[in-house]
Image (cartoon, rainbow, N blue to C red):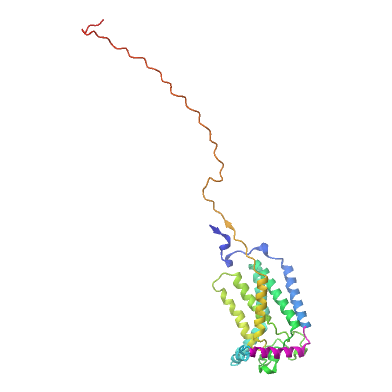
Amino acid sequence: MMYAGSEPADRREPDSSARPPLVRELLLVVGLFVVYKLGRQAATGHVEEAFRNAGNIWDFERSVHLPGEGAVQSLLLHDETLIHLANTYYATVHFPATLLFLVWLYWRRPRHYIWSRRVLAALTGAALVLHLLFPLAPPRLLTATGLVDTGQVYGPSVYGAAPEADSMANQFAAMPSLHFGWAVMVAVGLIAATRTRWRWLWLLHPLVTLLVIVGTANHYWLDSIVVAALLALALAALPLKRTEPVRVHVPWPSTANEPALAVVPRPAEPAACTVPQPARPTSSYVSSGTRR
């Protein structure tokens, strides 16, 4: 028996019938991005509440004995090149990596693309609601943490020096961390869409992202924990629909479905006619041996 669905995913041709129209997808992705940016901007202005929440988060992490964010930052600060690379990773990898992930899925795994796009949209929408309801200053802005704003000190930085006047980004939207959430989804999506033995290395992307966002003091540990929980809920609510394997049936030789042969009775053969054979005449001899 052969099953078409048993072939490795990265060797199968993409199902073009499952690929949505390109123009529609571009408009949809751009529209979602614009809504997200506008939503983040709408969450600005809650400065006092953001710093109050930051103090509560910092105290909560210490009460549950989470590792200090300063331990990760101290490792990065040992080498100025290393901290510069971390800042560069934070500033340049987040959006391009997610965009390339979606583009590759669109062309090579359309079914996985639709699933990943839905999960990312749900995760981003939930994060936006949380940004509005729970403004949070990052640890680099909270004096009590004693952490360094590595972007401002070592560069490059994607944020303005004055958070309250930053018109490009909402610096009080630390909870949850979409840097980490998107990175995890990129890894999960690529692992699900491929079958190569090396696909598990994609987990390095969220791992490095986690170390970067904590080491640069842009996020608390709790920001990553919350976004991971939100992503788990999104994945549970929007599972990847598996296609049924196509069974290629090779019929065994059988006469079960063949029409029955008509049985024509053979005509009875006529019985053999037994003709009595005439008796052979016997010669008559006189005992004397003379013939009459």
Q: Residue 46 appears at what percent x and percent y? A: 77, 87
Residue 12: give x, y in percent of width and height: 59, 64
Q: Is residue 56 visible?
A: yes
Q: Quadrant of the C terminus?
A: top left
Provide the residue span drawn in magenta.
43-63
- Towards the viewer: 121 or 31: 121
Is residue 93 visible to us here? no
Q: Is residue 57 magenta?
A: yes
Q: How many marks?
A: 0
Q: Nearer the viewer, residue 283 or 87?
A: 283
Determine the image quadrant of residue 33: bottom right
Judging depth in this view, the residue of 114 and 227 nearest the camera is 227
The prevailing secondary structure element of the residues shown in magenta is helix
Residue occupying the far left of the picture:
288
In depth, the one of 141 and 226 nearer the eye is 226
Which residue is pictured at 62% across the width and 80% down the height? Answer: 206
**Residue 154 figure quarter:** bottom right
Residue 83, position as x, y percentages in the image: 62, 89
Q: Is residue 272 above or below residue 282?
A: below
Image location of residue 68, percent across then percent down: 62, 90
